[in-house]
Amino acid sequence: MTTRGTPNGGAAAPRGTAPTSRDVAHRAGVSQATVSLVMGGKWRGRVSARTADSVRAAAGALGYRPNLAARSLRLGSTRTALLVVPALTSDFFARVHTGAARVAADHDFGMVLYPSPEGIGPAPDPFASAQASLDGVIASSMAPEALAALRGGGLPLVMLDSDPDGDSDGDRPAATVNLDIAGGMRATATHLLRLGHHRIAHLAAAVDSWTFRVRARALADALTGTGAALTATEPAELSVTGGLHAAERLLRRDVPPTALVCDDDLLAAGACKAARRLGLRVPGDVSVTGFDDLAVATAVEPELTTVRLPAEDIGASGMRALLTVLDGRVPDADVLPVELVARGSTGPPRTP
Amino acid sequence: MTTRGTPNGGAAAPRGTAPTSRDVAHRAGVSQATVSLVMGGKWRGRVSARTADSVRAAAGALGYRPNLAARSLRLGSTRTALLVVPALTSDFFARVHTGAARVAADHDFGMVLYPSPEGIGPAPDPFASAQASLDGVIASSMAPEALAALRGGGLPLVMLDSDPDGDSDGDRPAATVNLDIAGGMRATATHLLRLGHHRIAHLAAAVDSWTFRVRARALADALTGTGAALTATEPAELSVTGGLHAAERLLRRDVPPTALVCDDDLLAAGACKAARRLGLRVPGDVSVTGFDDLAVATAVEPELTTVRLPAEDIGASGMRALLTVLDGRVPDADVLPVELVARGSTGPPRTP
DNA sequence: CTGAAAGCGCTTACAG
DNA sequence: CTGAAAGCGCTTACAG
């Protein structure tokens, strides 16, 4: 395709506008209906192979692309889904998007991304802002209150990494796909207990969403009855700086913890910085764990022991669930496994 | 809005389908045209304030939302732009999206994101995959060969952080918005020269795009005639690991450089890890600089001296340029300033 | 195997 | 100040 100059691929459409199925029909000497059948791949048994070929040739020559707005209007569906995420700063959500968009494309669906400006919380109006006619909505890791706003359009809603029981009003999404967050946190606790830690602190993220509530509860449950002491802190802003400040406060205590379990890799990176500033070594003086396995987990030194979440998988699975709902069927509630990745930021506690 | 159960906000639309402007007109006792005028905000001087109010009341009661597909079909434009980026793994592009989407929303435009699966390179078919009728395209930091594919739809194209002279075929985008990449690299060179570095290595990214070619050239130009020796390496894969391997090779030389200028913060993070593995201290034994000021730049220890790119600004400016083009006017070619941020990863060379 | 016709929901001249 | 009508481009019964 060495097109130069002419924006339209060299083939002149009548009067400078984009070619329509009427133009293609005219050029191929058939009716508009035949063009539609051939372009839509529904011609077998309805149109002869010869005719189909000539339609395709005419379409190719004119550079015909079906007008999606017209198709949507006629069909009453747009084959477009909205993906709502709290932020794009974490590569977790970028990977969720990748997975969801891949499955969408496989089914001729488009995907519009809406990073909720509030971060967590009710999105003001994703629908107006997305400016697209939508067939359904996928939302990842949003606060439950966002649910109401999200189902504003009366659209099928699939929630990822969210409370499977819906919001406080008892509204439930059409489907949920979850991660075994509790299992990941249990694996972290077990890992630290086996290393010999007895004083463990939880560095919580100041984000009011299901995924973080589960992290806190699962850690507490896993340590109950083990003899290990669990310190909880004021939840920290979900950032490197937030982790740094919270960890500093913890490590300055008279009897500091020997291990810091962080809700997220960004917090863990901050915790490592705090340790270093206080002259402590990781993991020699204090062990640190993260969660999510973001890119930052292997960018820092030592690399973070963390819980790897299958981000692309949950995005893909969420889109499949939405397709199932749109198909009038009920998807299975899915829970994807996660995996503890032990790296350099954890080790046995210093024996005093 | 405490809606329970009924997906449609409690107000029953006729026969279970979404309400249309006809339904609103019927309920308000006016014509469809009046509804359109009022909803579109074009009623002043055409419809009485009383009538307008009653239309709005009816629309509110029914939960009416204009059908965007129908509007697009009628108007011949969709008020939707496509943003093509090489990857979403770098938070630079996430921020470009944020800036562009904000300006788009301010002008009632939607934004569809297309992370080119190839990373850099000609996107296979963003238009088919994006599955939306589009009014224009914004592409950031793509290889020039991608240009041809991108203008496939004959759509207005705005290129960000790209060669202002277009591709090898002489095709030019409708507008470009650039960053003063060369200025950023010059500032980096000056910073290192002032610290006293004489043996400087360039750790290049193995990405064939304008932005990285400019980085290499600007660094070479800035060091010419200064007496400093510039070592170039095999371009490295654009990742922490890529930077780590490339830096290891450089630092193992008989006469290693005292400063590593990296094309990107990920490479710089990898370079710092390489130094540490070889028992070298940053910046005591070797200085490292990054580029972009990604989140990782302040997550690592020491924090990276790097060049901060105004990512949201370039996204916003790109969307404004597209709006100008769609308005039939010619936007000014814009070059946004960048800023060197000196942090802990650079210092004077060790005096032997 | 193929074509003529209806209609999706909107906006905008145009007529009153 | 308001309404009736046309038409954007597509797909799908329906008739031949």
Image: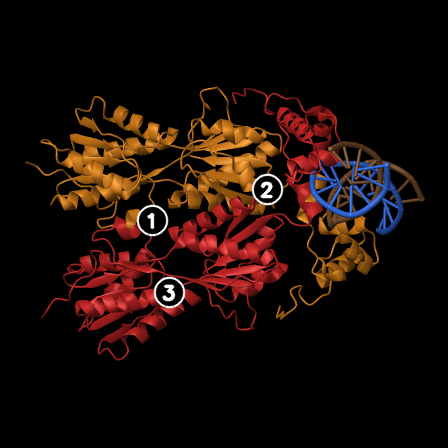
Chain colours: A red, B orange, C brown, D blue
**What is the quadrant of the N terminus of chain B in the image?**
bottom right
Please state the chain letter of the residue tagged with numbered disc 2 in the rendered image: B
State which quarter of the image contains the C terminus of chain B: top left
Judging by the rendered image, the residue that carries numbered circle 3 is A181
Q: Is residue B282 left or right of residue B66?
A: left
Mark 2 vs mark 1: tell me if same chain. Answer: yes
User: In which quadrant of the rendered view does residue A37 lie?
Assistant: top right
Residues at marks 3 and 1, CA–CA distance in whole angstroms: 25 Å
Residue B243 position in % (x across, y down): 25, 39
C-alpha distance separating marks 3 and 2: 35 Å
Q: Does residue A316 sit above or below A68 in this rendering?
A: below
Residue that badge 2 annotates: B132
Q: Are marks 3 and 2 in contact (CB under 8 Å)?
A: no
In the depicted structure, whether residue C8 falls above or below residue A257: above
Snapshot quadrant of residue B348: top left
Spatial CA span between label 2 and label 1: 32 Å
